[in-house]
Amino acid sequence: MTLGGALNQLVQLVLVAAAAPLLVGWVNACRAWLQNRSAPSLLQPYRVLRKLLHKDAALAENASWLFRFAPYVIFGCMWLVAGIVPVLAIDLPFAAAADVIALVGVFAVARVFISLAAMDIGTSFGTLGARREMLIGALAEPALLIIFFNFALISQSTSLTTIVETLAHREFALYPSLAFAAVAFVMVLLAENARIPVDNPATHLELTMVHEALILEYSARHLALIEWASAIKLFAYCAIGIACFLPWGIAEAGDWGALPSAIIAAAVKLVVAGAGLAALEAVSAKMRIFRVPEFVATAFMLAMLGLLLQYVFEA
Amino acid sequence: MIDVMDPVALSLLDYSPATMGVAAHWLWLTPVAPERASYSPVIFFIVIVAVVLAAFWLVRLLYHGRLRRTPPWDCGFPEQNARMQDTAEGFAQPIRQIFAPVYEIESHHPDPFDRLPRYFTEVRDHCWRWIYFPIAHAVTFCSRLVGRIQTGRVAIYLMYSFVTIIFLLAFVR
């Protein structure tokens, strides 16, 4: 492990945690503009977090230690994911400890904990949310793995840093299979981050809510951690998408001179991704819960098609 | 651990993982080469625990730990009891509904006014019905046919072997 690598790892961990609410603020602002509303400040998510962290936590009488402990685990898992995905530079010493399969596993750990915590109170809201979350997760996870296998096939590696290195810093090649994978990835991103066609983050209606039902019993600092974790999750997903599909601009290992341009490239790409996400949400409507499996299954099929295409072209 | 599992891998693959650089360090699981795939469960676990503890400690350090116990949100209906809680049955229901074409599901739902409600669901696998059961039935049928000539008397068994020998002598030269 080099000193530069360790420093880059640390910078990235802090940067992702700090910038994630800004991305959420940007997406919310874009959404408001597209809906002809006046947008809240970009810093609104930070204010919400600050408010929540200062409030007194109201905990249900029958909540166990698991309920209090889960937000920290979820936050930790998401923070860890943010440490594996190359955002600015490839040189991430910790990324070698976990490849994309472990990354999907970390998402699963967070999902299990949030579902267990939701069921801990025993009200029907929590279990309803947990059940739906598990339903979506169980279907989105294989799709995400197949998308990653597309890249594994191209770069002969399941490590994210090697994938980015292969795609960005070797000779340029067009991979038609990645077009399928990209569409599938966007669909999985929408499903996993509780965005509009699958779940509406702004609703509190029993019939439709998934993520909000899960965290209904949480308040104050616990809620702040979960909100922050979901902001980091969105950021991480966008960063994975950028790293895999548009990796140009991410600095190579040890190349400190490229870092300023890498920061600008990452910022521009995230701004575009956030605006695109808001536009996608503005033009689509929330679907019924039993239409969601079809949506995610489509993503799975597209990713599978990409994989087959890759096999055909390789042969 | 890898050395213990090595014969299994060797019998399935043409090469042994232990000789392919896995033994580089016991902490790392590297099937082929470090740049292709590597996974270090120990480091990974330690980092997860460290990050979780760091989050916990930071929140504790920067903010107060005030806590208030309140009744859980009951949606305006306070008389909830444990029987209204979700069950494993209900939890798995969406998944079952999605994969309903794959399985054979038979369920009986009680009437809401039933005094003694009984809920019954049986999930069967199509494979059992269309593949395994026919094979099992065929095997049982055949063994029953064979069982018919097994009378349990030594004289009859001796006659079987005698007939077989005659048969072999007549047809096999």
Image: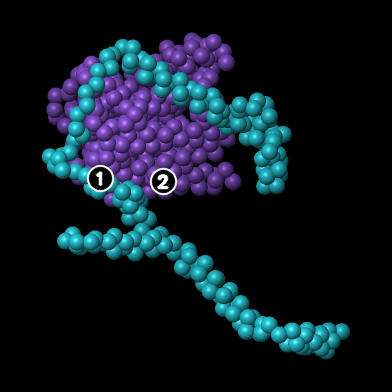
Chain colours: A purple, B cyan
Identify the residue at image location x=50%, y=23%: B46
Q: Amino acid at mark 2?
A: Phe
Q: In the shown orientation, is residue A45 left or right of residue B32?
A: left
Residue A300 - label: 2
What distance separates the C-alpha of mark 1 from that of mark 2? 38 Å
Give the SS element for disc 2. Answer: helix
Chain under numbered label 2? A
Vertical arrangement, residue A248 with respect to residue A104, above or below: above
Give the SS element for disc 1. Answer: helix
Identify the residue at image location x=27%, y=36%: A121
Within the image, what quadrant is residue B144 found in?
bottom right
Nearer mark to the viewer, of 1 and 2 = 1
Residue A54: percent from left, percent from top: 23, 16
Chain under numbered label 1? B
Asked whether residue A255 is in view, the answer is: no
**Residue holding disc 1:** B82
Nearer to us in this view, A212 or A4: A212
Q: Quadrant of the N terminus of chain A?
A: top right
